Amino acid sequence: MPVRHTVIVDRIKDWKWAVEGLEVTLANDYLTRQAGAQKRPIRIINLCRHYTYLSGGYYCSLLAEARNDIPMPTVADIVDLSRQSLYAFSIPDLERLLENTMKRLASPPEASFDLHIFFGTCDDHRFRRLASELFDIFRYPLLRLRIECGKEWKIRSIRPMGLHQVTAALSDFFETSLRSYTRIPRRKRHDSRKPALYDLAILYDPNEKLAPSNKAALERFIRAGQRMRVDVELIQKRDYSRLSEFDALLLRETTAIDNHTFRFARKAEAEGMPVIDDPKSIIRCTNKVYMWERLTSQKLPTPRTIPLNRYRFDEEAMCRVEDELGYPMVLKIPDGSFSRGMFKAENRAQLAESAHKLFSHSRIILAQEFMYTAYDWRIGILGGKPLYACQYKQARGHWQIVNHKADGSTVPGGFATMPVEDVPKEVVNTALKAAALIGNGLYGVDLKQNDDGIFVIEINDNPNIDHGIEDKVLKQGLYETVINEFIHRIESMRNE
């Protein structure tokens, strides 16, 4: 099929459609292309993310006109829509048409709404005449019309949209409108699957012994993405330079401030993509000193805890800890995970020995009252809502849920996964309050429950999602919930 139009995009990942007869080129390539002799003008569809003065979108239309191509929008269109004062003259006629349309509707909208106008057609066919009139005035490929409800219907704003703001819900409408405008019919496909709308990267380490997701869980993330039109790709530390190719990032490798996981999260955030978990959550969750301060300041119940300073850990400090906590007690390094960096002290000798080991890694450590329970609650929370609930049982003959042996091997305890609605409400509500102190990401809140009440032990920014354990109740639905959260976040960020 001969090329009829050239589509310009800022990033190749913004283009999600397979439309024959179109040349898709990057803005940078178009701007640096040498102008040559042409038999006839090229029709340019400028779908850059921004059209502000001297932006990439502005220059693409400007150079298209200089090369005798036919751009949409033109530079004049860009200027006309750059400030509301410049297009205010057209609003009264459009509002009269809007009001007449509303009067004819059997059930007009009851609240303010957005109307999306792609290539002169709109996503609500009842307003097709208004869309056509608007397209005649402002020759933009993608427009968003904000209509507000009051005593009279008013057009509050007319704004161009970038291609990256075309959400999954608008994807089919965009393709249909584009094909209609360019007169490119759909071809029958032997493969009925639609192309992916978004690309999700999952950072993992295939050699990590206690990874937050096992191989089977990662495979289920990929399957969930296929069903939901999200391409899920497993990436590793070496793929740092490729991160900008994706729309979102999920960390499934144990996080730490001083390694590449944090750098990945920082870069993803700088690229404007959703990342779970975000840098702020990693900072807050990976340090138990911060977590203890945060929880106690908000009056959330925690085991009695005393911070210990390496330079003030003397006889007097040990006496105070013994008086307040008694034996046994637990000593923790602030950034330990998976029950690592923790010691149980049964007497003063063990207290001194364990503290000495931990002080070699951190200036501040935590001494905490020992609170034995047969199991720990783990409430998985995503976006402020409970996702799963597990009871992690203590390893056999051990005081932790994972027994780290001297030879480097590990022995985990058992588990019981149950529907969230079967968990005591106090447990779930306490977990939700604790997670809200950290952020709006994916968290695993660990709690203990005994005769004295419910206590928050810690909040994990990178909680386990393993096949056969955390997904025991929701099964594939757990992975789909996570993927759907990413879709929601991608589309929300693009609509800001």
Image (cartoon, helix red, strand yellow):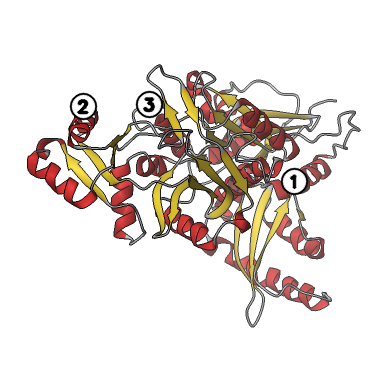
The residue identified by callout 1 is 174
Residue 358, image x, y percentages: 24, 30
Residue 106, image x, y percentages: 84, 76
Mark number displayed over residue 478: none
Q: Earlier in the sequence, mark 2 or mark 3?
A: 3
Q: Amino acid at mark 2?
A: Ser
Q: Residue 264's quadrant in the figure?
A: top left
Task: Kindly report the distance in space between the C-alpha atoms of the residues bearing marks 3 and 1.
Answer: 41 Å
Crowding at mark 1 (Cα within 10 Å: few <14, some 14-19, many 20+): many
- Judged left or right of residue 229, residue 61 is left
Which structural element holds mark 2? Answer: loop
Q: Residue 347's quadrant in the figure?
A: top left
- Judged left or right of residue 164, residue 305 is left
Q: Nearer the viewer, mark 2 or mark 3?
A: 2
Q: Earlier in the sequence, mark 2 or mark 1?
A: 1
In-front residue for pair 413/461 = 413
In-front residue for pair 263/291 = 291
Which structural element holds mark 3? Answer: loop
Q: Amino acid at mark 1?
A: Phe
> Is residue 43 visible in the rendered structure shown here?
no
Marks 1 and 3: in contact by CB < 8 Å?
Answer: no
Residue 169, image x, y percentages: 72, 50
The residue identified by callout 3 is 259
- Judged left or right of residue 300, residue 320 is left
The residue identified by callout 2 is 360
